[in-house]
Image: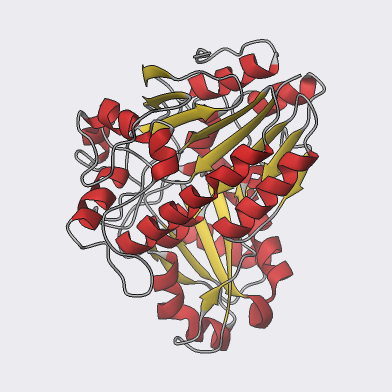
Amino acid sequence: MARAFLFVLDSFGIGGAPDAPGYGDDGSDTLGHIAEFCAAGAGDRKGLRQGPLVLPNMSALGLLTAAKLATGRLPAGMPIPDRVFGLHGAASEVSHGKDTPSGHWEIAGTPVMFDWGYFPAGEEAFPATLVEAICREANLPGILGNCHASGTEVIARFGEEHIRTGKPICYTSSDSVFQIAAHETHFGLERLLSLCQIVRKLLDPLNIGRVIARPFIGETVHSFERTGNRRDYSVLPPEPTLLDRLIDQGRKVHAVGKIADIFAHQGVTRMIKANGNAALMDATLKTIDEAADGDLVFTNFVDFDMLYGHRRDVPGYAAALEAFDRRLPEVHRKLKPGDMVLMTADHGCDPTWRGTDHTRERVPIMCFGPGIRSRNIGLRSTYADIGETIAAHLGIPPGRHGRSFL
């Protein structure tokens, strides 16, 4: 029986989304702009990396072909491989959002065809009635922030006051999200997680996609640092996903990283946590060894988005891509006959774009394994084709959305 390994490179968009103008993202291109900056020397950082973006393994798996399908052009300065292996193409998103749950759920065969609730930009992001309810239910003296902000910026701005007053830092973004930053020891990690659960219930009527706990440590603005104990509290997907369908067929789903949180822990047999791309890859390789016939190993590599995309760090993003690419041969060496690896992304987060939010882009599809021949699968009209391909590979009945490209 087959096994499947699904890797989401969080935010690794390749541009060209046909509906990008409607999101204010016309021209955004995470891969293309990183490559362009690197080719021009703007991706250099002393002690980290320099020169053009070089991703030999992903390029040999069809990344450049996917980028050309998405945008009509090849990424600047990237060496073109002599041969391309495996199935490769690009996919457009049909879900209404450009957020993490929408992208992952659609990858798993369940597009989001409703509109999320959002908090408006302005002096105060959250309505007074909601703030009052949170403070009452959680016995808080008040909150700090109450604004649209990036995580590192808002902690630097309010962290010392938070330690002094005990008020949690609450903020949002253009995503459907309510984020809470609090100190792991002064406020307490368990208290922060309990607060997030209270807020999750209060936000259900507003159709807000996620509440995210953002714990940090340090004593001053100069030493604050977010920890790996982030936790996402998501609403349930609107209908059964690929993960649920696999469980119903007696298969196992190994969720590495934040996958379990994204799916509200539904359709997950086993949860494996790790902090950072390197540790996530280590955990994934170990889980590949442990996975049985018919299993799915599903990993989100979060650093691309969290550390580099949102922070608009081109050299950091480029270096993270090159580090990930260097480890792909380790994955290949683990594969057995019947195995399939499928790599993709959930949205874009162009580090050269205005603002600090996600960008509406197409995503790459790179699929390889023993016995999988090279073929261009073209432009796919929905990410759901990815989930349906895994369903077909693992031999379970097809779902309602998408079409396998096997």
- Whether residue 265 is visible: no
Q: Is residue 365 above or below residue 145?
A: above
Which residue is at 28% across, 29% downward?
Answer: 70
What residue sits 40% from the left and 51% below the top? 119
Using the image, determine if residue 50 lies above or below residue 82.
below
Q: Is residue 23 toward the left or the right of residue 62 in the image? A: left
Q: Quadrant of residue 105?
A: top right
Q: Is residue 125 above or below residue 251?
A: below
Q: Nearer the viewer, residue 330 or 301?
A: 330
Residue 177, visible in the rendered structure:
yes
Where is residue 330? Give x, y as percent.
61, 46
Q: Nearer the viewer, residue 194 or 36?
A: 36
Q: Residue at the location (39% across, 24% down)?
A: 89
Hey, which quadrant is residue 186 in on the image? bottom right
Is residue 93 rendered to the left or right of residue 296?
left
Tell me where residue 307 appears, x and y as whole percent. 44, 62
Relative side of 115 to 66, left or right: right
